[in-house]
């Protein structure tokens, strides 16, 4: 339940091929500035992936943005999947171009509210807060029992409790034997894309995979804009591929303060691999080391690396090095510099997420750990 | 009620110095009309690309149209031609724009909704049924799969025995702005630009009357950019295509005259006029001095304009008629070569026939009743307009400098520069509306209760079902051996880095679909996942 003590979590989704994202981006930023936690799942999502994300993120409201005129096809599908996934407690709101004549039909489907262009922002935010406040609470015992049965709803709810700093009343999860892999690197290097593709690859190999994506919170409002998930969307509901976005909290570090506990919960749930993405604070940040068994440092060609290589810090804690964007010029030089600096002690991989190249070797390295 | 100047995004319309509500000659510095303006039709073309402009030839009234099946749009084309429209402009549906077939799972509910669904040569054949391609000029608004749609158009012309050199029209074909704003990209930026250069090369050789790229600011502006950002990003994209074509070994004077531009015309009347004038001046200098073009035709920037869709409101939709009329006047005073006026209902749905006709009549009134066509660049020499033209040019130059510092357009895309700036500007405008600083008539002020009350065009799900059925039949009945061989040639040509246009035309004739050709190229070029978002 959200009683004003915690920022409501809102998932904003664009579904289908419509790329008009001005509105959804303005909303995402405005919600963050109003103190909400926003998970934006990016363009070109299916109804199924969107609702699967809503379950895993345990959001209070789902907002769907449609400017494609497909609302009478898409919204029934969204509501059907919501029922199938047993998350009917999560209200759905629709924003976009919905002709007045279609509004009653959309609301009749079970959509909680429809907002058109020109709707005042404060009214939208007020509606979202009201809907979030009406979110039913779930009993702690119920959650523990569900967790024991590997129910993803329970896992999602338990992470929410931790995220709010409420603690688990002394309850501790069973010990697991997951390998925790931290993935770090400078902003823009492609951490989310690499994790998304690696996660799916490990999943195809029959491994159970959890991903924790951490984005910064606004130090002022406590709101956050969590956008990393958009590169880690699974196609279909899958209990063994679980992605959760965390905000780093007001502390300003690159890891969420609750991150170690969240990792323990995921570990106890029975995942084989837990991939933790950090906000990309760069080389000054070595907090990831305490959390993970192994750390992957992501780099890209032509990023002034030769200077960084010689500096102490993040280079020392990395267990392996992955040069992403190897489709770009300068990849050979970056790899050569890396090889001469660290190649004798630790593996160096070249990958391109755009071309889907080289990730198999990284997956091999991970499964060999 | 007093009207205070807004302090925000459209600051350049705040006339004059703080203590003076007008602009005087002292604010023009060392303004020299001979250098800054020239005469209409002479360097640097600030006053217009042609000497006589609308006196001799009106702008082309080109209303964007497309919805439902190829047959539906074919009928709308014939309706518009019958009402005096002088060129066709094709809107494709979202699946086609994204290079996906109508039966693609992600196309669910979107087939024929926002434009016409074209998945194969057979669809293109039906789209132009009974329309003489040698007599009509056709614009196609398509980007990621632009080369494929061009291949379809060429193949239909060849079937009808129309020589390619007679084809007139425009391919939007501007992929860079998709990365900045509209998000209809498929391949990564580098191979995407390579495909654009392929089409420029092909058309320069075979289709000399075809405008190869319509370098577009429209979508950048609609996504939230300011007028100066629209101007600068668009011209920077144009420069990137020119550089790519020169790097291919093409003669700059052979292809440059066939690049055209496409701008948004928004509400800030004089700022828009200044933007269009500044665009011509900047481009003339860039073409002559930076790219060393020698022909005058290479220096002049020709443009299409469209009134600002984003300025339309759902509330009190009739108000949109007046918005569009003022915007259209700005486009004409700015010297556009072609114009689309939005229909009053376009914020609600695809325009109805009635609304489209009113939009066209808006242009006809402007052209035939107001006499604004009689003197070229009537605002030239106005202290205010010249100052504003200088200012917006200076802002654009500052942005070019930033893009250069980031390593050029493609590198700046990789760093999220354009998307971030556009999102920030959109957010800033939203804040102004929220705070009441920026008024929207009928929405923030002078609002009324009640539903809008205009009749809307309805697209039914039947369109999608019929289109999917046709596609299924095509896939079953085509010559499978010829089809497979054509796609294999396409894959090989893409991998070898040669111009893919001949392979695309062959694949079109072998009934390969848009989706199949895109998948084949994706296997070589890769798929772009969007770059930095915030």
Image (spheres, coloured by chain):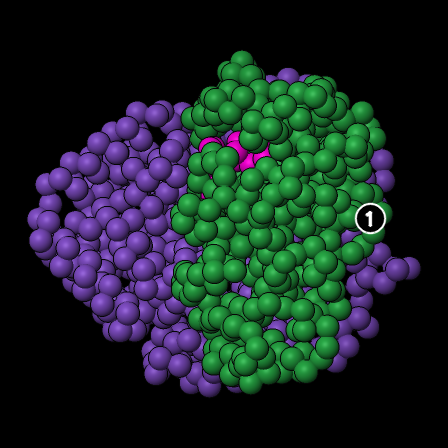
Chain colours: A green, B purple
- Please indicate, yes or no, whether residue A300 appears anywhere in the rendered image: no
**What residue sits 65% from the left and 66% below the top?**
A186
**What residue sits 46% from the left and 86% below the top?**
B292
Q: Residues within 10 Å of mark 1 (few under 14, many from 20)?
A: some
Helix, strand or loop at label 1? It is loop
- Please indicate, yes or no, whether residue B517 appears anywhere in the rendered image: yes
Q: For this rendering, which residue is in front, B258 or B484?
A: B484
The secondary structure that most of the magenta stretch takes on is helix
Span shown in magenta: A44-56
- Residue B28 percent location from the top left of the image: 76, 73
- Residue B460 percent location from the top left of the image: 36, 24
Image quarter of the N terminus of chain A? top right
Q: For this rendering, which residue is in front, B394 or B400?
A: B400
Which picture quadrant has residue B3? top right
Q: For this rendering, which residue is in front, A73 or B400?
A: A73
Task: Look at mark 1 in the image and give the residue it sits on.
Answer: A250
């Amino acid at each position: 339940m959200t009683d004003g003590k915690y920022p409501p979590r809102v998932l904003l989704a664009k579904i289908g091929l419509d790329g008009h994202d001005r509105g959804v981006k303005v909303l995402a930023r405005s919600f963050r500035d109003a103190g909400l936690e926003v998970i934006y799942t990016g363009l070109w999502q299916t109804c199924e992936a969107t609702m699967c994300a809503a379950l895993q993120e345990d959001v209070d409201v789902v907002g769907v943005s449609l400017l494609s005129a497909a609302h009478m096809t898409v919204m029934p599908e969204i509501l059907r999947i919501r029922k199938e996934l047993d998350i009917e407690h999560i209200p759905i709101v629709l924003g976009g171009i919905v002709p007045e004549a279609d509004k009653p039909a959309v609301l009749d489907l079970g959509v909680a509210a429809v907002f058109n262009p020109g709707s005042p922002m404060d009214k939208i935010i007020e509606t979202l807060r009201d809907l979030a406040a009406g979110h039913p609470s779930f009993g702690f015992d119920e959650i523990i029992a569900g967790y024991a049965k590997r129910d993803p709803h329970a896992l999602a709810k338990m992470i929410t409790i931790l995220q709010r700093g409420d603690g688990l009343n002394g309850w501790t999860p069973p010990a697991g034997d997951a390998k925790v892999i931290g993935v770090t690197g400078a902003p823009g290097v492609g951490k989310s894309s690499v994790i998304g593709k690696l996660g799916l690859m490990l999943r195809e190999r029959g491994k159970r995979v959890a991903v924790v994506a951490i984005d910064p919170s606004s130090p002022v409002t406590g709101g956050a804009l969590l956008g990393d998930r958009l590169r880690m969307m699974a196609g279909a509901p899958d209990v063994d591929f679980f992605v959760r976005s965390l905000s780093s909290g007001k502390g300003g570090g690159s890891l969420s303060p609750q991150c170690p506990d969240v990792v323990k919960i995921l570990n106890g749930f029975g995942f084989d691999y837990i991939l933790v993405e950090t906000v990309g604070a760069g080389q000054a940040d070595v907090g990831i080391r305490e959390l993970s068994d192994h750390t992957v440092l992501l780099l890209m060609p032509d990023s002034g690396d030769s200077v960084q290589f010689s500096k102490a810090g993040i280079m020392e804690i990395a267990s392996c090095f992955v040069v992403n964007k190897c489709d770009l010029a300068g990849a050979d030089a970056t790899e050569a510099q890396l090889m001469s600096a660290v190649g004798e002690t630790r593996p160096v991989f070249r990958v391109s997420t755009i071309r889907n190249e080289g990730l198999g070797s990284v997956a091999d390295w991970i499964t060999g750990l | 009620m007093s009207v205070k100047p807004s302090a925000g995004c459209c600051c350049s319309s705040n006339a004059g110095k703080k203590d003076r509500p007008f602009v005087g000659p002292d604010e023009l510095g060392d303004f020299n009309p001979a250098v800054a303006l020239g005469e209409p039709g002479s360097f640097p073309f600030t006053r217009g690309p042609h000497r006589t402009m609308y006196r001799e030839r009106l702008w082309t009234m080109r209303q964007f149209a497309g919805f439902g099946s190829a047959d539906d749009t074919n009928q709308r084309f014939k309706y518009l031609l019958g009402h005096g429209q002088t060129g066709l402009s094709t809107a494709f549906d979202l699946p086609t724009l994204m290079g996906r077939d109508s039966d693609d799972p992600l196309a669910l509910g979107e087939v024929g909704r926002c434009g016409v669904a074209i998945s194969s040569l057979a669809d293109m054949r039906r789209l132009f049924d009974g329309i003489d391609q040698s007599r009509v000029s056709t614009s196609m608004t398509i980007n990621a799969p632009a080369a494929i749609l061009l291949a379809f158009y060429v193949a239909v012309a060849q079937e009808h025995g129309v020589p390619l050199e007679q084809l007139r029209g425009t391919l939007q074909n501007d992929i860079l702005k998709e990365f900045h704003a509209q998000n209809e990209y498929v391949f990564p930026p580098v191979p995407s630009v390579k495909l654009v250069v392929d089409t420029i090369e092909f058309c320069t050789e075979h289709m000399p009357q075809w405008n190869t790229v319509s370098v577009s600011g429209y979508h950048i502006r609609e996504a939230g950019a300011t007028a100066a950002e629209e101007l600068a990003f668009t011209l920077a994209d144009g420069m990137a295509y020119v550089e790519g074509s020169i790097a291919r070994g093409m003669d700059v004077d052979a292809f440059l005259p066939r690049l055209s531009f496409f701008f948004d015309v928004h509400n800030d009347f004089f700022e828009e006029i200044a933007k269009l004038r500044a665009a011509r001046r900047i481009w003339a200098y860039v073409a002559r001095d930076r790219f060393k073009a020698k022909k005058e035709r290479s220096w002049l920037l020709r443009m299409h304009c469209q009134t600002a869709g984003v300025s339309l409101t759902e509330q009190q939709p009739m108000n949109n008629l007046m918005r569009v009329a003022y915007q259209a006047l700005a486009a004409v005073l700015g010297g556009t070569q072609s114009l689309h006026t939005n229909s009053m209902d376009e914020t609600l749905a695809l325009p109805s026939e009635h609304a489209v006709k009113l939009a066209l009549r808006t242009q006809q009134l402007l052209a035939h009743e107001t006499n604004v066509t009689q003197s070229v660049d009537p605002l030239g020499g106005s202290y205010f307009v010249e100052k504003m033209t200088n200012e917006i040019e200076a802002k654009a130059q500052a942005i070019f400098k930033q893009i250069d510092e980031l390593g050029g357009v493609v590198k700046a895309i990789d760093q999220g520069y354009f998307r971030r700036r556009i999102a920030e500007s959109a957010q800033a405008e939203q804040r102004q509306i929220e705070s009441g600083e920026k008024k929207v008539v009928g929405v923030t002020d002078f609002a009324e209760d009640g539903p809008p009350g205009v009749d809307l065009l309805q697209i039914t799900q039947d369109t999608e079902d019929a289109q999917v059925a046709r596609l299924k039949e095509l896939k079953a009945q085509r010559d499978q051996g010829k089809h497979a061989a054509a796609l294999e040639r396409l894959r090989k040509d893409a991998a070898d880095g040669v111009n893919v246009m001949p392979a695309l035309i062959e694949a079109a004739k072998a009934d390969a679909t848009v989706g199949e050709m895109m998948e084949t190229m994706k296997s070589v070029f890769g798929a772009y996942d969007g770059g930095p978002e915030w």
